[in-house]
Amino acid sequence: MYGVLFLLLIPFLDLTRFCTSTDTISLNQSIRDNHGDKLVSSGEFFTLGFFSPGNSNKRYIGIWYNKVQEQTIVWVANRENPINDTSGVLSIDKTGNLVIHNGNDSFPLWSTNVSVAAPASTCSAQLLDSGNLVLLQGDDGKAWQGFDYPTDTMLPSMKIGMNRRTGLNRFLTAWKSPDDPGIGECSYKMDLSGSPQMFLSKGSVRLWRTGPWNGFKWSGVPKMPSNFIFNFSFIDNHDEVYALHTLLNTSIFSRLVVNESGIVQRLTWFEGDCRWVEFWSAPKDRCDSYDTCGSYGNCNLSDDEKFKCTCLPGFEPKVALDWSLRDASGGCVRKREGQVCGNGEGFVPMTHSSIPYTSVTRVNMSLSLKECKEVCLKNCSCTGYTSANISGGGSGCVTWHGELMDTRVFSNGGQDIYIRVDAVELAQYSKSKGNHGKKLNVAIMVVSVAVVSFLIIFLAYWFVMKKSKGKRGMGNLSFSENELVESETSTDLPFFDLSTIVAATDNFSSANRLGQGGFGTVYKGRLHNGQEIAVKRLSKNSGQGIKEFKNEVMLIAKLQHRNLVKLVGCCIQQEEKMLIYEYLPNKSLDSFIFDEAKRSSMGWEKLFDIILGIARGMLYLHQDSRLRIIHRDLKASNVLLDAAMNPKISDFGMARIFGGDQIEANTNRVVGTYGYMSPEYAMEGLFSIKSDVFSFGVVVLEIICGRKNSSYNQENFQNLIGHVWDLWGKGESLDIADSSLGESYQTHQVLRCIHIALLCVQEHATDRPTMSAVVVMLCNETSLPLPRQPAFISRRPNNGPDSSSADVGACSINDITDTMVEGR
């Protein structure tokens, strides 16, 4: 009798087992809507189950984030075949396929529909932590996967592109509406005609394109987020061509979505505000719209966000009247047709450009750029050329054959492209290039005279007003020491002639090369009077444009402090943009603290002086100077050391000036170095003096540890901040002190610096101290508050000195962070 009862209980025992959290179903198991059944991935990242979108009552099988409060669907199975009630069932049928049935209806509404070689009893379906639903057959692995049939969302590790062997084409299609996940009009798909690239389309109408892959990103997306949250990959071989990205920290939730409005968005979950934050989207402006200026047209966006169509070199409007009415869709035609083959023709470069689209391109990775030019010149159908890969100095050859479409100019980014022109156009270009330097010299002379004249008038006026106020009994004008230095600083910064800089650097000799920065190369030089200088020569493909260049010139010329680098002058001539600094023989801080031999020779006392010097320099920028400056790119490589090892903050190309009462600002253009960025800046573009404080905290930890924040990867911690925080919670903070310091350091001082650094890298900006408070804490033995949860760490339960102090809001999830790359 007991045996019979046990047999009767077996199905219920099995059901009880299945109702606990599971990521897998097999034959004779199912997901039933009216039972509320779900699959949850093993790491509890994703959930699979039935859902109703928006205001609809229809039921679908979908996958969504398990740890995000707002249900966010990333994949839908039966998007074209909804169920009208809660009778839906997902199961594995006798053929080994995953199927969805409506109640007792024997005909499936949806099926994986693959040929499964193994017996159905050996088949199972599993939801992975990547969000991929896979159908497994016996020991042969995957028979089917959801990632091969994406809906509107691209998740990390999902391929978008073509399998050339099977013909499988993976692409995104938008929902019809927020209430209907059916296949909408908008798609995001790889186009293989010409060089492979992604196109956003609405029906048959192309809306926007990424441009081809240029070695490290899509060429038409200069602001493409890279190398901080994601690793991007592009594969193109005989078997397949696809793009994918992976996350550098799996605790981040980030997705790319194409919506029904025809917009591609990169969204990342921001835990602090319990919402998805847009990192990037396209199209953004009129020049982003595909083929705005027609064939052989070029789109340029002005500073006031107005677009302007021009023709490529050697071309003119096809219908001049249309262009005068601001309709350039008819495009351009050659000025002198039939003169570009065997008649002394050549090429004119266009800088900071997107790669034109044409259905016929030829790629040869074995050719140099010079060889590419010769190949194009010998082929009359070739309309232009460029490098196939711009990383590592450039390599490979791309030639275009046919009409050039959808070209635009970027203010920053892009690459040099070379347009075929006839002999007349080539001669005109050469002549204008020769005159450019002369015109620029004249312009500089005129501007210099105007500036000097203005200063004379201004100083005379100031002197008169000062005396006038004194006579009226209105009090004396008072200046702080810093302000007095600034008032004596003239803005007529010396302009150096290019020939002077060429002579000083021995024609930019490699022997004088000091290093490579984000915007170009730095050379050592010696002026004719014997003064040693450092020349920052901006590369032509530099991300720093004229705006950032002028920004740096104006800022450093106005700022004077012993812990800020001194600008000697600048050079703007022909295509060159150069900044001339005082030469600092010990180069940058990172070359010392990350070099074991150099670091051991410094000692803790010198390292502490460097920390204090950086703090005082930042305090001057934030508070003591007449201008309130937010640096936005403080890092070890941007701190230079003079002969006495005094630190001097450099590289103000990304700095911003704040008004006297302004405390924060927002930008759509996040710049700087990931790993040193504060979370509110990296995630939302919100920057303030507190974002600089965060960067300072990272630098302090690197100085103490002798390791880069981004280089640390151990156990669950993706960066140095997480490791330090963990040791702090255990009372083992001194373990991070670099052993090369020996016994030279004062224990209490090192512990105090670690404590201050943790206060600086707290997740919420309002919790961080100001730089004035930091300087006070460094110089005095005052009591320090307990630090709260830092940003950008892989969190563990109850880590930190006081878990109650983490201030995790109602929407917080303890094991999810809004982490950025190099800061992990």
Image: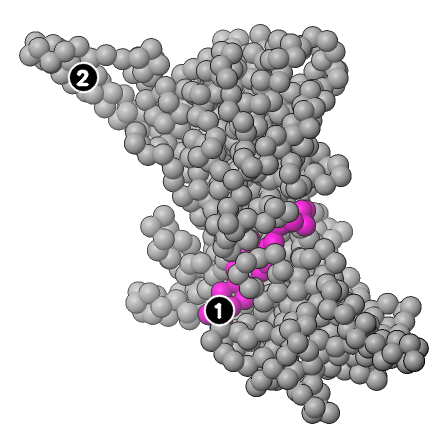
**Position of 325 compared to 762: left or right?**
left
Residue at 53% over, 74% down: 53
Return the x and y of residue 583 as percentages of the image width and height.
Answer: 54, 15
Q: Which amino acid lies under the numbered mark 2 shown in the image of this protein?
A: Trp
Q: Nearer the viewer, residue 301 or 113?
A: 113
Residue at the far front: name it: 1
Q: Is residue 175 magenta?
A: no
Span of residues in magenta: 248-268
Q: Residues within 10 Å of mark 2 (few under 14, many from 20)?
A: few
285 w.r.t. 166: above or below: above
Residue 629 appears in view: yes
Q: Which amino acid lies under the numbered mark 1 shown in the image of this protein?
A: Gly
Residue at 43% over, 31% down: 689
Residue at 55% over, 81% down: 58
451 w.r.t. 78: above or below: above
Residue denoted by label 1: 262
Residue denoted by label 2: 462
Return the x and y of residue 241 as percentages of the image width and height.
Answer: 72, 64
Return the x and y of residue 354 as percentages of the image width and height.
Answer: 53, 55
Residue at 46% over, 44% down: 685
Q: Nearer the viewer, residue 512 or 645?
A: 645
